[in-house]
Image (cartoon, rainbow, N blue to C red):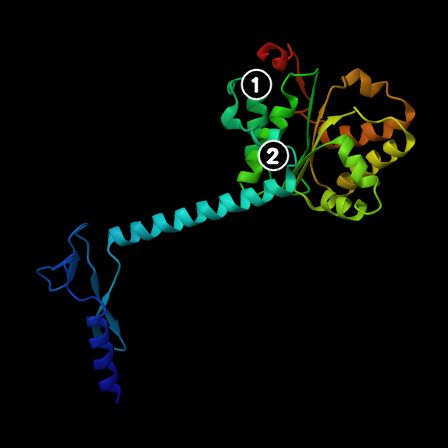
Amino acid sequence: MYEEFIANLSEACRRSAPADAGTYVGENGILYCEKCRTPRQTDVTFLGHALRVYCACRCTMEAAERERAETQAAEARIRAGELRAQGINDRAYLGMTFARDDRPEHPLSKAARRYAERFEPSAEQRGLMFMGSVGTGKTFYACCIANALMDAGVSAWVTTVQPLLRMAGDFSTAEEIFARIKSVDLLVLDDFGACQSGARNVELLFEIVDTRYRCGLPLVVTTNLRPVDMRSAPIELERIYSRVKQMCVNEHSPIIMDGADLRELAA
């Protein structure tokens, strides 16, 4: 029975790689691929018996690797699309990518690219703050970072402060909003400092920032505020700014964006 099993296995191996138009028999009796000239068969020993079995030639393995890479790329595109659908609700933000950056050698661009390349979704990841007047590119580079991270499979949520405050203050959506604030890898608060009037808004904004702080998750902020504005803030805003500075001020941040209004120049 044992000898019969070995014989049947050997015959099955032989039939698994029959000679066809794409192969030829080498001097050693083994099938070779006509395209890449590498073996389609190999000799192995199984339980003391020599067997000749099928193996993939080099071009077959290369084709399989290309297919695997294409599948992974397609899955990554699908994943990035899902992340953008969840994390970006303003179509204008979708077009703000490093591929459309017309000044890649500018120090501000390099700083944003460096942040995206080195980003790790962990408690050790520091935040980033873009400060400057209107139209200097703060939102553009913040969204470039978010889009680059989503392309890499990292979750990000880009939102301006005012609609976030509305959703966080709505009883029907507050629980969902704060669950996202606690879980998304990167939260981008655009136009920070523009809607901080009213006791309820101030309270909600502190809760949003403090939630990220207590979860140890990074925050990217764009603001028209100047450093002096944060230092001389009213008492009700001081604790918010203190939290933001703890999260976003480091040796690489804030990034001060000076210069003319780029939108006005373009117009």
Residue identifier under label 2 = 146
Q: Is residue 111 left or right of residue 217?
A: left
Asked if one can make out residue 54 in the rendered structure from this viewpoint, the answer is yes
18 above or below 35? below
256 above or below 164? above
Which numbered marker is on residue 50?
none
Residue at left offset 89%, top offset 34%:
200
Which of discs 2 and 1 lies nearer the camera? The answer is 2
What percent of the width, then of the height, locates residue 69?
A: 40, 47
Secondary structure, mark 2, is helix
Mark 2 → mark 1, Cα distance in angstroms: 18 Å
Give the quadrant of the N terminus: bottom left
Residue identifier under label 1 = 107
What percent of the width, then of the height, locates residue 12?
A: 23, 75
164 above or below 112? below
Give the quadrant of the C terminus: top right
What amino acid does circle 2 point to?
Answer: Ala
Residue at left offset 58%, top offset 12%:
266
Q: Is residue 264 left or right of residue 12?
A: right
Secondary structure, mark 1, is helix
In front of the other: 250 or 17: 17
